[in-house]
Image (tube, coloured by chain):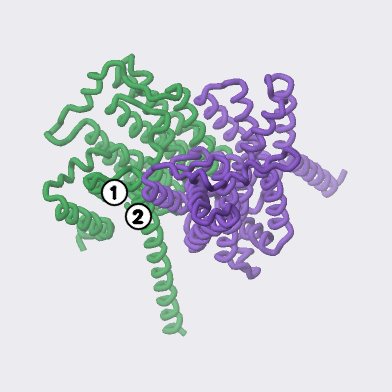
Amino acid sequence: MSTTEAMSVGYQNRAATRKSMNILRNWALPLLLVLLFVISALLVPNFSELTTIRAIFLQTALIGICAVGMTALTLSGNLFSLGVTPTVILGAMVYVWVGEASKSMWIAAAVTIVAVLVTGVVQGFIVSLGLNAVIVTLAVGAVIYGVTALVTKGALVEPSEKVDLAGFATFAIFGIPLPVIVFVVFTAVAWLLTQHTLIGRKIFLLGANKSAAEISGISPRATTVWAFILMSFGFGIAAVLASAQIHSVQADQLPALTLDTVAAVLVGGCAVSGGDGSPIKSAIGALFIATVAQIMVLLSVPDGLKQLVLGIVVVALVVILHVLRKAGSR
Amino acid sequence: MSDVGRWFQKYLLQFVVLAIVIASMYALYPNFHVETSIERIMPLGVVAAGLAVTMIAGEFDLSIASMAAFSGALTIWLSPIGLIPALLIAIVVGTLLGMVQGWAIARLGISSLVFTIGTLILFRGLTWVVTSGVSIRVSDVKSTDVFRVDILKFLSPLSLTGIVIFILLGIFLAYTRWGREIYALGGARNEAIAAGVRYKRGMMVAFGISGGLGAVGGGMTSALNGSASPTAFGSLLLGALAVVLVGGISLSGGRGTMVNVFLGFAIIAILSAGLAGMGAKAFVAELFTGVLLLVVLLFDYLIRTLSERDRKKRLKKVAISTA
């Protein structure tokens, strides 16, 4: 065998490994999820009951909508947001206030989404100056939390008896609750937006290679702001659904939402360096985290252990996905 | 210019801000005491110093607040063997966990932001397990008295430890080989590695220090209060970040000293003492820290763009005069 032939065989082998690594990376989480469902259905009492599945999906809907939104930010190379909870709580409060004033849940929902979009645009502008998104969102999150706590004085914000704002949470089609439907539709729309539209392509390219994106005429500033807009749109929808669901809102609520959302995006397999990932992956990541949490509820695992297991799952999956990605790109 | 003059010029901005802050505090509260305000939140300074080391190394330790909560819980949990041995064990455990983090980050070549947000959740989980989800207290309340004796009138063991840590860490970073290597890895990583700096060791040292100092901050706070809660230190990361950035540590790595961190800490400490003096609630402090952080970020951005513009203008002038 000549040297060139040996080289080409070696190259083909490497290409084959690379391909299988990438297949493994893309299908690792869905497979794990199916495995988790099968094992739990066999071993965990009450797991296969309709109420459990419903609870898992309702839980997934909130985390998932936030995670799918945040995927746009991660894809654009701007890491992740540490201000999910305060933003969603602010939106939830706006929903109650406007709903109370206008007596219409539709107007309330529209105003809520616009209000949350405004916070996103502001943060997008700050980050697009070239500042670190994690730090900016942490700081803005602290400001939003401070303002909501200050305005409400830490008290509950709840609609009066006369106004019904729970419609978005109680409505169901064929027994499927509206939040779950919204989650699925939002994921599909986000997938279409990121994969098949100009702005989605720009976000991908900016995250994959910033200087190449700049040279090919993509404005990093405008694209970053767009990524923030897409993310905030998700947060706005999540805020409406959360508010309709929990009825009375308080500044200290949903403390775990930020980390659950970030965990869903990371476990889903988005590259934090940007340019690699998909809203569908993040949605599956959210489903995975909600399923693990629900299984532990059924097994009546104490709160502490639940947190620990979640932490171990996140660290382990992030490391495995990272190793597979490295092996696949070599 | 003399060395002392140059030293002051380097930290001019921070000194000016500090002077303004102190002056306005004395104007607002005639019986204000600078030293007591620093004393009360010394753990924040220690934790910020740890965060600063990872930032100088060009990385970021998001898990440091969870580490503080975990070490606090561990200290109280182990307190039946004596509070001081328990604290020492917690610090050793924190340092070791930090070193493992540093090793994993270097070995895997993973972004420290990603890895440490995973360990942020993990350490918080460990805290919940150790405290079994409730606030725990030391059985012997008098045992915390060791931390309340006065040394030299106004120094408590806590603030003395904090100051010693600042001095030792400053010397370590500025004058030892391992310390200089951390700067090299943060400032120009590829060049440093090419020149023979050991990347894995540098990361283990940097994250070992941040883990250890997170443990010192959390452990000492809990030891002093004689209690630990699973949800403690929720806004510590924000506070530490504010200290580090107000002090003038560069976000891009390789720049900044312990003097920066200490000045930043003094500014934040006095401001928060002022807020507490007004009877402001915790969320007001958080709001304030958030605004301050944004102002510092934007200020830093302005200075960077202006100096860049200035540099370009000068380059153009040179180009014209040589043409």
Q: Which residue is mark 2?
A: B292
Chain letter, purple in picture? A
Which residue is located at x 51 percent, y 26 percent?
Answer: A303
- Point out which mark residue B268 bears: 1
Q: Is residue B279 above or below residue B5?
A: above
Residue B276 place in picture, x, y as percent: 25, 44
Callout 1 secondary element:
helix
Q: Nearer the viewer, residue B104 or B137?
A: B137
User: What whole-number distance in Å separates the C-alpha atoms at marks 1 and 2?
Assistant: 10 Å
Q: Could you say which is closer to the camera, residue A53 or residue B47?
A: A53
User: Residue B155 lies in what quarter of the image?
Assistant: top left
Chain B: drawing colour = green
What subunit carries mark 2?
Answer: B
Residue B60 is labelled as none
Quadrant of the frame with the N terminus of chain A: top right
Binning the other alpha carbons within 10 Å of mark 2 as few (below 14), some (14 to 19) or many (20 upward) gives some
Taking the image as drawn, is residue A164 in sight? yes
Q: Count residues near mark 1 (Cα–Cα under 10 Å), then give few for <14, some for 14-19, many for 20+.
A: many
Amino acid on which the number 1 mark rests in the picture = Ile
Chain letter behind tag 1: B
Tell which of A153 and A98 is nearer to you: A98
Quarter of the figure with residue B79: top left
Q: At label 2, which amino acid type do we have?
A: Leu
Task: Determine the residue positioned at 66% across, 57% down.
Answer: A204
Would you say the residues marked 1 and 2 are in contact, meaning their CB atoms lie under 8 Å apart?
A: yes
Query: Is residue B190 visible in this depiction of the protein?
Result: no
Q: Is residue A137 left or right of residue A178?
A: left
